[in-house]
Amino acid sequence: MKREFIQFRCSVYEKKLLKVKARKSGLTLSEYCRRAATEDRIIERLSEEQIEAYKMLVKYENNFKRIGNMFRQRNPKLSEEVSALADEIRNHLLNFRK
């Protein structure tokens, strides 16, 4: 059980920065400061947007692996698959402009 109390002074900017970093890592401000002071590992959590981008990149990686495998196997549907993938990528890129 934590019973001891420590205070320290910081600027308004530093406090806001600490709060942002704590929130991004999914920790309370106190826990973030404790971990930073003890040089414990602090991992920033991914936002929903970052998670979606990651999932999309995984899907693209799998698709490109499949395309590479098709080249080796000389699959006649390769042209259709590549075209569909290009269209999907184009749609995602158009969403970034919004």
Image: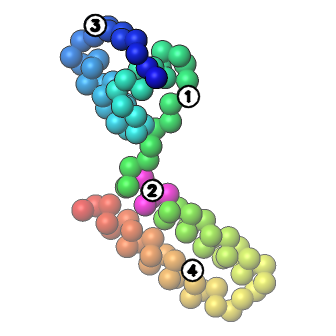
Q: Which residue is mark 4?
A: 82
* Of pointers 2 and 3, the one earlier in the residue sequence: 3
* Of pointers 2 and 1, the one earlier in the residue sequence: 1
What's under tag 4, amino acid-wise? Val
Q: Are marks 3 and 4 in contact (CB under 8 Å)?
A: no
Give me the residue at 28% from left, 61% from top: 97
Q: Which residue is mark 1?
A: 41
Give me the residue at 45% from left, 56% from top: 51
Camera-side residue of 66 and 28: 28
Percent coordinates x, y for residue 48 in the rendering: 38, 55
Region of the chain picked out in magenta, as a range: 50-54
Disc 4 secondary structure class? helix
What's under tag 2, amino acid-wise? Ile
Measured in 3D between alpha carbons, the distance from the residue under mark 3 to the one under mark 4, in whole angstroms, is 58 Å
Give me the residue at 31% from left, 66% from top: 95
Q: Say above or below: 52 vs 37.
A: below
